[in-house]
Amino acid sequence: MQEWKCSAEVGIIPERGKRDEELILPINSSLSVTLHQDQLKTTTTAAISRDFTEDRIWLNGREEDVGQPRLQACLREIRRLARKRRSDGLQDPLPLSLSYKVHVASENNFPTAAGLASSAAGYACLAYALARVYGVDSDLSEVARRGSGSACRSLYGGFVEWQMGERPDGKDSVARQVAPESHWPELRVLILVVSAERKPMGSTAGMQTSVETSALLKFRAEALVPARMAEMTRCIRERDFQAFGQLTMKDSNQFHATCLDTFPPISYLNDTSRRIIQLAHRFNAHHGQTKVAYTFDAGPNAVIFTLDDTVAEFVAAVRHSFPPESNGDKFLKGLPVEPILLSDELKATLDMDPIPGGIRYIIATQVGPGPQVLDDPGAHLLGPDGLPKPAA
């Protein structure tokens, strides 16, 4: 039995559509930051046994259909790699039979299917756990990618590029680390949870419609993304937050422009999302420089990048603009943030009527590592019988 934890990731220059839906090959390269597992994580336990009669999987305590095509693609690829390892004479002294069925239990400590990269963390953890129980030690980019494209990026910590590749078989569509999690220690990430509900349209279906109908998306992928990838990589390596923040916001805005350019149009943002954008720009205008930067994936929840010396003031600005209705003591989760009072000058610049309850809560986190093993047997999600442990 193996248990691992993996973190969610946030796209900085995201992929926006696939050129091959079955192999999950993107139309452009992408760049993301892996978040810290102390605040956002997927925990996955995998076990194989001669006593299991079928493959089974549980997500957040609920059994899911193990026949899902993407899940099956991951299982097939792991078992293929395990067979190849044995045929190459690299098997362990006491190899486990490939005929054994697998049981998998996975839990997220953040909202699932709400636009917070839960599928990326989930499939990265699944690929890693399956690889360990079947004795596979090769690159897992392709395995994770077959489950969720961005999952290949979650296999690494820090800042990670997913290279789109050119081969039709996808063998060169892999992830590589641009910089480790220790590279930019001052960088902080605030996740403003507007809604924890499932998205009305999944990102996969939405992106495919965009690929088919949006001329702007095609222009973006071919003409703009390559230069933006190079510039963002420079920003990260030089820890240039001004340029990093502006490019992050521009790219997020452009993604949502491609959503509106899709036919029928897609709108992932809501009124609260747009007010967060307004808040960020007014906050930056007050300081005369880019102190915070937003990005939105396929959902209304905002991800804010900033530096550690700005966190407290921006959290106070969020509280001022979106005061918690009833959970004031639980409004901020994750890293501790010292409360401060906003200056009258900043309040005047923000000039926003408060919307109580507009933001459900904030998760404060930072850049984190790749998959980690959990050695404590008490933390396993599966019991000795291979079934999920009863909820505590």
Image: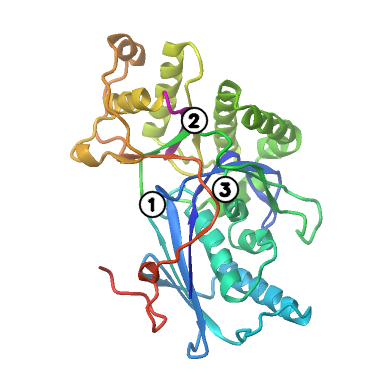
Q: Is 189 left, or right, of 234 in this rendering? A: left
Find out whether residue 362 is within the magenta segment: no
What stretch of residues is rendered in magenta? 301-309
User: Which residue is more in the foreground, 199 or 179?
Assistant: 179
Write the residue at 59% across / 62% down: 147
Report whether 179 appears left or right of 188. Answer: right
Find disc 2 in the rendering and name its residue: 186
Disc 2 marks a residue whose amino acid type is Glu
Q: Looking at the image, is mark 1 or mark 2 earlier in the sequence?
A: 1
Badge number at residue 110:
1
The quadrant holding residue 250 is top right
The nearer-to-camera label among 1 and 2 is: 2
Which badge, 3 or 2, is on the more N-terminal residue?
A: 3
> Which SS class for mark 1?
loop
Magenta-drawn stretch, dominant element (helix, strand or loop): strand
Mark 1 surroundings within 10 Å by alpha-carbon count, few (fewer than 14), some (14 through 19), many (20 or more): some
